[in-house]
Amino acid sequence: MDKVKTSIAENLGGISHKLADKADQFDINHDVPDLSGKVALITGGSEGIGYAVAYTLLKANVTKMFIVSMKEDVKDHAVEEIRQNLGSEYSNKVVWLQCDLSDLPGVTEVAKQVRNQTDRLDILCLNAARGIMTYQLTDYGLDRHMAINHFGHVTLTSHLLPLLKKTSDTDTVRIHMQSSRSHEDAPKDVRFESLDELNTDLGPNGQYGRSKLAVLLYARYLDAHLHKEYPNILINATHPGIVQTKQSMQDIKEPYPTVGQAMPLAVKYIMKDIWMGCVSTVYAATATTKSGQYICPPAIVEPGSELSQNGQLGEQLMKLTRQIVKEKFGAQSVEKGCPLTDY
Ligand SMILES: NC(=O)c1ccc[n+]([C@@H]2O[C@H](COP(=O)([O-])OP(=O)(O)OC[C@H]3O[C@@H](n4cnc5c(N)ncnc54)[C@H](OP(=O)(O)O)[C@@H]3O)[C@@H](O)[C@H]2O)c1
């Protein structure tokens, strides 16, 4: 019974969070600390779960809120909603940086713009993603799910490391990575051994699941290396639940037109809304004092799949990541003195 209650709390909407143990509760209306003086960055912060996170951090008085996403009209809508609900002194704190995370030189440029506009970074939320969609390659020949969900975020983090480390000299820094329960859909024989392996079409669920396994492995990898050396930097991954967003309600129709039409309507009334879907992320980004955890809503720590706990697989993933970045972007990055320092 406890398992059923926990699974409902972690995944579904309505009053589900109340089913969690008291120790695992987190309420964005009461438990978010005051964030005055703190600077945050979130990818995918203008829509869906990321928007609810950005809004909540602003409401808690974060001093500057960088949002990295792609669509200007979506960002304009988000900022206007913040202005209408919280006031222009809050919406004026948003700094929007347009970027497609699969464009790694573009991501590097964005990190440079961030470094030029702040001398601290307290909260880094790596939230944006390509959802359950069909297989695609980027123009430089890399699986688009891995490119956006993993490579883009690794590149961004690596270029922001000096800022994060400097901030951690005096304050706690929290890095959050949005994984998913779907990390369990990664194939059991995943090795992260070659570009050819990454570029094999696994189908929409396998493709997405493998990229979310990579996100979780990367969080544990940074915990093992970065947190060990910089104990004030806490790195955690989350699952947000099953949440009503563009990804779950619209993007899903791309690979599954028939199921996609009917399914979201059927489950709409039991899914979390974005305010419930942002809870585990806001907890990881503002309140936790632990590192290396996989946190489900509201603030329930889960072990994750066996593969996600395999440190050797995480090392192999990051070895392959460095190798592919060097192969694909050596001329723009490595040979210009950027060795992709990942911790
Ligand atoms: N919804 C769920 O049930 C669920 C479940 C488990 C995990 N998640 C995870 O939660 C996170 C947020 O998803 P969501 O459900 O809130 O989806 P969403 O509403 O579709 O939002 C996705 C966000 O990611 C941004 N994004 C997508 N591709 C990008 C790219 N190539 N470069 C830069 N930004 C990009 C989008 O920016 P633009 O609007 O500018 O395109 C948007 O802001 C994702 O990591 C997702 O995998 C969601």
Image (cartoon, rainbow, N blue to C red):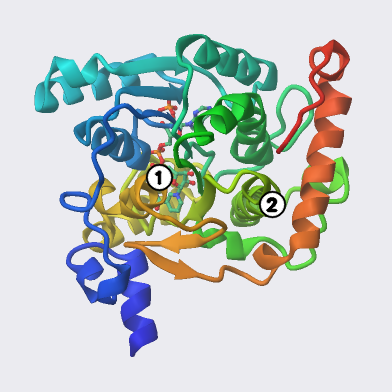
Which residue is rendered at x = 60% and y = 65% of the image?
A: 184
Separation of marks 2 and 1 at Cα, in angstroms: 18 Å
Q: Residue furthest front?
A: 170
Disc 2 is placed on an element classified as: helix
| Quadrant of the image where one finds ligand 1 | top left
Amino acid beneath label 2: Tyr
Residue 137 sits above or below residue 306 on the image: above
Label disc, if present, on residue 172 of the rendered structure: none
* Label 2 crowd (10 A; few <14 / some 14-19 / many >=20): many
Disc 1 is placed on an element classified as: helix
Res. 121 in view: yes
Q: Position of residue 215 (x, y in %)?
A: 61, 49
Which residue is rendered at x = 32% and y = 69% of the image?
A: 24
| Residue 235 appears left or right of 193 | left
Q: Position of residue 176 (x, y in %)?
A: 49, 45
Residue at the disc numbered 2: 221
Which residue is rendered at x = 79% and y = 29% of the image?
A: 141
Q: Which is nearer the eye, 155 or 193?
A: 155
Q: Which is nearer the eye, 61 or 205?
A: 61
Label disc, if present, on residue 285 of the rendered structure: 1
Residue 76 sits above or below residue 274 on the image: above
Q: Position of residue 95 (x, y in %)?
A: 37, 15
**Which quarter shows the N terminus?**
bottom left
